[in-house]
Amino acid sequence: MSVNCAAEACTEAAIALLDERHFCRAHFLARAYRHLESIASQIQDQRFHSEHGESAASFLEQCMRQTADLACGEELPGNLERAQVLDVLLWASELHGRLRRGPRVRAKIPILVRCEDPMKPWEEKTETRLVSRHGFHLECRHEVQMGGTVTCIRLDNSRRVDAKVVWARVKASGETEAGLQFLTDEDFWNLETRVAPPGPSEDLTR
Ligand SMILES: [Zn+2]
């Protein structure tokens, strides 16, 4: 009982489901890519998160399930097809993770970063580049160890939090750029009390 692809004029057998419709592999991939591109282009937008976050998440979940099934199944004729399916699977799961972590907001919040490494302790005043509900990006002159933990103290309100360095890279200028994730689940930047619509969150973007 095979179903035909729902794309217009396509006579291929359907092998995957997307948006409640069945598609052949080629049309499934084309549609999935279009959706993923659209989500990727809007994922930085706070409004997209509040208005379309749920539907985007459910699309991505379905996309991940379908591609995981396809990647394990026998319907794929060759390595190229398998690579495309895996590409969609990885992209969907990356976007899903970013969607869950919430939007990143460009914000320069003054902070003191302190590394209590007994061998090489340091502290430095700097500011954030991007902040999100679960972490932030910064630039600093000290070397930041990936996987290491630092303490971040807000210079505007003295709040402090421990954060883990998720990635770090040394720029051509010699400064280090790093992404940090909080070790606790608190709304450190008060992002949830500053509701998305234009206005109250404006000061964060300066
Ligand atoms: Zn088709």
Image (cartoon, rainbow, N blue to C red):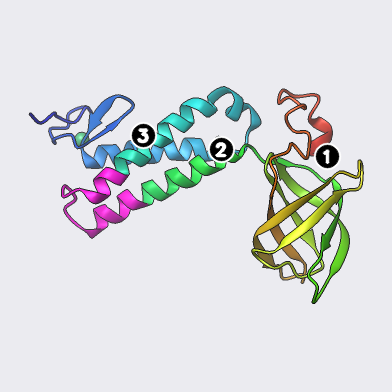
Specify whether tag 1 is near ligand 1 (CB below 8 Å): no
* Residue 103, x across and y down, in percent: 64, 37
Q: Which residue is mark 2?
A: 100
In the rendered image, the quadrant that contains the C terminus is: top right
Q: Main secondary structure of the magenta part?
A: helix
Dot 1 or dot 3, earlier in sequence: 3
- Does residue 152 appear left or right of residue 86 in this picture? right
Q: Number of labelled discs?
A: 3
* Front-most of residues 178 and 115: 115
Q: Which residue is mark 3?
A: 62
Foreground mark, 1 or 3, reads 3
- Quarter holding residue 33: top left
Dot 2 or dot 1, earlier in sequence: 2
Q: Seen from this angle, which residue lies furthest front?
A: 118
Question: Residue 1 shows which numbered tag?
Answer: none
- Quarter holding residue 156: top right
* Front-most of residues 26 and 110: 110
Question: Residue 206 shows which numbered tag?
Answer: 1
Dot 2 or dot 3, earlier in sequence: 3
The stretch of residues the image draws in magenta is: 68-86
| Circle 2 residues within 10 Å: few <14, some 14–19, many ≥20 | some
Verify CB contact (< 8 Å) between mark 2 and mark 1: no
- Does residue 72 appear left or right of residue 62 in this picture? left
Residue at 51% x, 26% y: name it: 54
* Residue 155, x across and y down, in percent: 91, 47
**Residue at mark 1 to residue at mark 3: CA–CA distance:** 38 Å
Q: Secondary structure at mark 2?
A: helix
Q: Secondary structure at mark 1?
A: loop
Question: In the rendered view, would you say 202 is above or below 115?
Answer: above
Disc 3 marks a residue whose amino acid type is Gln
